Amino acid sequence: MATPLVASVAALTWSQDPTATAGQVWAAIRDSADPISSFSGQMGSGRVNAANALAAISGG
């Protein structure tokens, strides 16, 4: 069920900054994810965090 959640966060992030590139949106989502230490090495970037992604794309 991660795909629909990440897709919705991507849409929210793009709505915050419609001029952002796909790479910028991906970086905002990836870099703002909450790490899950028990899954280290088993998943991409951790648990998606919509609030942090929106803050990241806004520069704050």
Image (cartoon, helix red, strand yellow):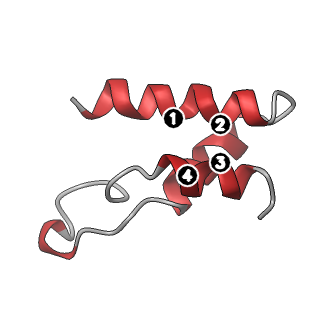
Check whether the beta carbons of the residues at disc 1 and disc 4 lie within 8 A of each other: no
SS at mark 3?
Answer: helix
For discs 4 and 2, the disc positioned in front in the rendered view:
4
Task: Tell which circle, 2 or 3, labels the residue nearer the N-terminal end.
Answer: 2
The image shows residue 51, relative to residue 59, as above or below, that is above
Q: Which residue position is annotated with label 1?
A: 9
Q: Which residue position is annotated with label 4?
A: 51
Left or right: residue 41 compared with residue 51: left
* Location of residue 14 in the rendering, given as x and y in whole percent from the top left corner: 70, 30
The image shows residue 29, relative to residue 37, as above or below, that is above
> What's the amino acid at mark 2?
Thr
Check whether the beta carbons of the residues at disc 2 and disc 3 lie within 8 A of each other: yes
Report the label total: 4
Q: Residue at the location (59% across, 43% down)? A: 26
Q: CA distance from mark 3 to mark 1?
A: 8 Å
> What's the amino acid at mark 4?
Ala
* Location of residue 32 in the rendering, given as x and y in whole percent from the top left corner: 53, 61
For the residue pair 3 and 41, the one nearer the viewer reads as 3
Q: Quadrant of residue 2?
A: top left
Task: Tell which circle, 1 or 4, labels the residue nearer the N-terminal end.
Answer: 1
For the residue pair 24 and 48, the one nearer the viewer reads as 48
The image shows residue 29, relative to residue 21, as above or below, that is below
SS at mark 4?
Answer: helix
Q: CA distance from mark 1 to mark 4?
A: 9 Å
- At label 3, counting other C-alpha atoms closer than 10 Å, the crowd grade (few under 14, some 14-19, many 20 or more) is many
Q: CA distance from mark 2 to mark 3?
A: 5 Å
Tell me, for residue 13, which label it has, or none.
2
Task: Tell which circle, 3 or 1, labels the residue nearer the N-terminal end.
Answer: 1
- At label 1, counting other C-alpha atoms closer than 10 Å, the crowd grade (few under 14, some 14-19, many 20 or more) is many
Q: Which residue position is annotated with label 3?
A: 54
- At label 2, counting other C-alpha atoms closer than 10 Å, the crowd grade (few under 14, some 14-19, many 20 or more) is many
Q: CA distance from mark 4 to mark 2?
A: 9 Å
